[in-house]
Image (cartoon, helix red, strand yellow):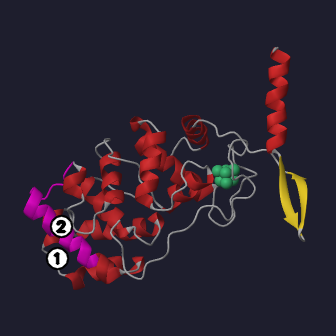
Amino acid sequence: MAVAKKKTVAAKKVARAVKTVKTLGVRVRQTVAPKKKMAPPVETLDRLHAMHPDAHCELDHANAFQLLCATVLSAQTTDVNVNKATPKLFARWPDAKALAKAEQLEVEPYVASLGFFRQKSKSLIGLAKALVERHGGEVPRTMDELVKLPGVGRKTANVVLGVIWHNPDGVVVDTHVQRISQRLKWTRQSDPVKIEKDLCKLLPRDRWDIASHILIFHGRRICFARKPDCEKCGINDVCPSAFRAEKVGRKPVRPSRLPTV
Ligand code: SF4
């Protein structure tokens, strides 16, 4: 009985591995590789964490205000570039009260290397003013309050809530998290808000913060957008896109205006 059942399962697998295709008007049966069974996302995340045990937020900061500013500045540029610019910026304007009094023209040279520098300077000053007027210069601790600040979207808010307060309201979805979630088939969505919802359903709340850091580390070091290094990747046995991932994981369209992040 058990042998018969085994045979049925094996037969089904073989049946799935054969498909009919039309070539030059003739229908032919072709054998295709059976689909990989998706591993539980938490297990895959654990394995990725073992590959990147040091995964953490790579934006240099000493407090919530600095992380908030650095995250706003990171739109459309790299953390490395932001980390080069922020030491001088924070040395001159160490907190919201100081930055709220700055003139845009004064701030611009400090962020000139980051692109969108006029808009970023304006955003930083607007953000500092809002922090002073609404929160006494402190960074609020809730998603609702954070996303009401100028230039702050769910992504930035979740970075601060996760990294500083260890209480994220979701998973940070940047270009790396988006691409790898799609490659791992953790989501079929391309909209970051919808991807975040899928990830929140798949992963336990206490992994939301570290999950984004792990995926970002993996995206920066192995699962590159153009040429993912599947050969070196420690989860290539369970990744449904392994060795054919180049076209999986759409990059968001580069906006002509600085988006809220
Ligand atoms: S196997 Fe390839 S596509 Fe899959 S996660 Fe690893 S590097 Fe990315």
- Residue 38 picture quarter: top right
Q: Do the residues bearing badges 2 and 1 touch, measured as CB atoms within 8 Å? A: yes
Question: What residue do we see at 48% from left, 44% from top?
Answer: 211
**Quarter of the image where the N terminus is located:** top right
Task: Examine the rendered structure and indicate whether residue 61 appears above or below residue 170.
Answer: below
Q: Quick one: SS at disc 2? A: helix
The chief SS type of the magenta part is: helix
Identity of the amino acid at label 2? Ala
**Quarter of the image where the C terminus is located:** bottom left
| Image spot of residue 159 (x, y percent) | 35, 53
Question: What residue do we see at 8% from left, 64% from top?
Answer: 133
Identity of the amino acid at label 1? Ala
| Image spot of residue 67 (x, y percent) | 31, 57
Label 2 vs label 1, nearer the camera: 2
| Image spot of residue 71 (x, y percent) | 35, 62
Earlier-in-chain disc, 2 versus 1: 1
Question: What residue do we see at 32% from left, 57% from top?
Answer: 154
- Spatial CA distance of label 2 from label 1 is 10 Å
Magenta-drawn segment = 121-141
Residue that numbered label 1 is attached to: 102
Q: Is residue 173 left or right of residue 148?
A: right
Residue that numbered label 2 is attached to: 128
